[in-house]
């Protein structure tokens, strides 16, 4: 059988997913809604409103879609998978209650507590109780301290003040600033010492298979300084995630997560992102995402030697355990090219040049748009340059060689992607 696929999303993650799906021998037609200039050659970009479930359902019926794949988190947290399932449509992505692992930090922390999944100690406060939150922080007197907006905030809802004055300022920002909607509830966590990494699993509600690990670079500045972003670059595999550590992550974190969700009547189907802190006590959960990470997706999907579409279909049919997931042994890295000013205000509509000069790398589009024969910037994170090699050092060297061939006005990128990984290999 050949499957007609609808993929929702427009970023670098969705370009990478479209690239993976397009390689499938089982693919019929691929539609990407809305997609971007990079996905044009892989399928057909279509204009659909991700918040208009009825409009999407009409499209699914009209185009005989066999499986809908959801890239971003918002439709999942809004119950899109539930909506389609009620219409007897096949969807790859968790239902609303399962997606609350990302949709609510409080839900995730309480879930981990119930199932003895290692994570940081925490307290939760309502926005009307921020005075109590301030007292709690002052009484603890432990800095840095981690403040997390409970709801979705585009990867920017975590603040880590290092002094009491910074903590009080952060509380004010969460109450009155751009994050106030996401911070109707506030999770305050102890700061975990260690190094971050991410492990990704694909799940069918009962079973899971690990499909890779990576290390992301969240901060805008060199040496992990400055404001948090959606991600400035990533590499995979992360040397800090040893075979021994991965076994612990599987047995202590992912297995009880999948089992716990099922036992509570919310079987988890889709990609599961587990953000980890590798502490002296072992791996602990920083956060869950109910979808693939971005830009980690861009370095993990190319490693899959199995047919991505077949694996997704197997998940929707509850037969992941009978399906092989094979990964290659190459290192990959991605450097994210962003608009100057990101993650704060930035200009759009800048002409991108040099894309035709890239021969030995993959370039996944994120914030771009087409204007005739020209590709223009159309977002904060604009492009992902992805390279592969037998060593991490070589993959990084190739990436920066290719980055130097691309330009647009006020382009910015970090020059230290992967340096933490290299230290582990010395």
Image: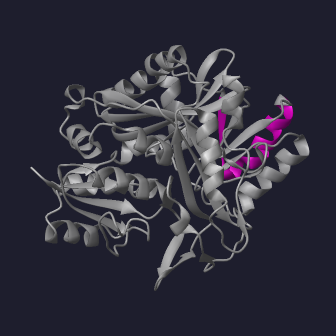
Task: Pick whichever, 307 or 319, lies toward us.
Answer: 307
Asked whether residue 10 is drawn in magenta, I would say no
Q: At which x and y percent is residue 226?
A: 79, 51
- The structure residue drawn at horizontal position 41% and vertical position 22%, both measured from the top left corner, is 256
Q: Is residue 163 found left or right of 78 in the rendered image? A: right
Residue shown at the point (90%, 46%) measured from the top left: 165
Q: From where the camera sits, is residue 231 visible?
A: no
Residue 64: image location, x then y, percent:
13, 64
**Is residue 86 shown left or right of residue 239?**
left
Is 319 rendered above or below residue 66?
A: above
The rendered magenta stretch, by its main secondary structure, is classed as helix
Furthest residue to the left?
1
Q: Position of residue 298 (x, y in %)?
A: 48, 48
Q: Where on the picture, by quarter, is residue 53? A: bottom left
> Is 365 or 404 nearer to us in this picture?
404
Task: Tell how many labels.
Answer: 0
- Magenta residues? 122-139
Horizontally, is 402 left or right of 77 in the view?
right
Measuring 85% from the left and 31% from the top, which residue is drawn there? 139
Which quarter of the figure has residue 192? Answer: top right
Is residue 124 covered in magenta?
A: yes
Query: In which quadrant will I find the C terminus?
Result: top right
> With respect to residue 191, does 355 lie above or below?
below
Which residue is more in the foreground, 10 or 262? Answer: 10
Q: Which residue is drawn at 71% across and 47% down?
A: 129
């Amino acid at each position: 059988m050949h499957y007609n696929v609808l993929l929702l999303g427009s970023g670098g993650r969705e370009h990478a997913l479209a690239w993976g799906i397009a390689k499938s021998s089982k693919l019929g037609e691929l539609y990407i809604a809305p997609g971007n200039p990079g996905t044009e050659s892989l399928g057909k970009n279509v204009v659909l409103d991700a918040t208009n479930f009825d409009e999407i359902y009409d499209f699914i019926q009209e185009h005989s879609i066999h499986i809908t794949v959801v890239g971003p988190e918002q439709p999942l947290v809004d119950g899109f998978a539930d909506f389609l399932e009620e219409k007897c449509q096949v969807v790859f992505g968790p239902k609303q209650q399962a997606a609350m692992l990302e949709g609510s930090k409080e839900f995730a922390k309480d879930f981990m507590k119930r199932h003895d999944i290692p994570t940081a100690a925490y307290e939760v406060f309502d926005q009307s109780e921020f005075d109590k939150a301030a007292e709690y922080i002052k009484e603890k007197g432990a800095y840095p301290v981690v403040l997390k907006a409970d709801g979705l905030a585009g990867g920017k809802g975590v603040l880590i003040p290092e002094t009491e004055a910074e903590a009080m300022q952060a509380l004010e920002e969460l109450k009155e600033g751009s994050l106030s909607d996401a911070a109707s509830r506030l999770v305050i966590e102890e700061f975990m010492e260690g190094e971050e990494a991410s492990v990704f699993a694909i799940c069918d509600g009962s079973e899971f298979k690990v499909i890779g690990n990576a290390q992301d670079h969240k901060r805008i500045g060199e040496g992990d300084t400055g404001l948090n972003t959606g991600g400035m670059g990533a590499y995979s595999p992360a040397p800090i995630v040893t075979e021994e550590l991965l076994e612990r992550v599987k047995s202590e974190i992912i297995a009880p997560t999948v089992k716990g969700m099922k036992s509570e009547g919310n079987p988890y189907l889709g990609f599961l992102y587990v953000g980890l802190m590798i502490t002296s006590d072992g791996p602990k959960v920083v956060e869950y995402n109910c979808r693939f990470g971005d830009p980690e997706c861009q370095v993990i999907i190319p490693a899959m030697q199995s047919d991505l579409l077949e694996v997704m279909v197997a998940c929707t049919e509850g037969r992941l355990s009978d399906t092989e997931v094979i990964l290659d042994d190459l290192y990959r890295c991605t450097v994210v090219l962003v608009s100057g000013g990101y993650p704060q205000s930035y200009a759009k509509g800048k002409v991108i040049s040099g894309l035709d000069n890239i021969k030995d790398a993959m370039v996944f589009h994120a914030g771009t748009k087409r204007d005739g024969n020209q590709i223009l910037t159309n977002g904060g994170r604009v492009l992902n340059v992805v390279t592969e090699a037998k060593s991490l050092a070589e993959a990084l060297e190739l990436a920066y060689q290719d980055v130097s061939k691309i330009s647009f006005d006020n382009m910015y990128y970090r020059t230290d992607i992967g340096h933490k990984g290299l230290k582990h290999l010395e």
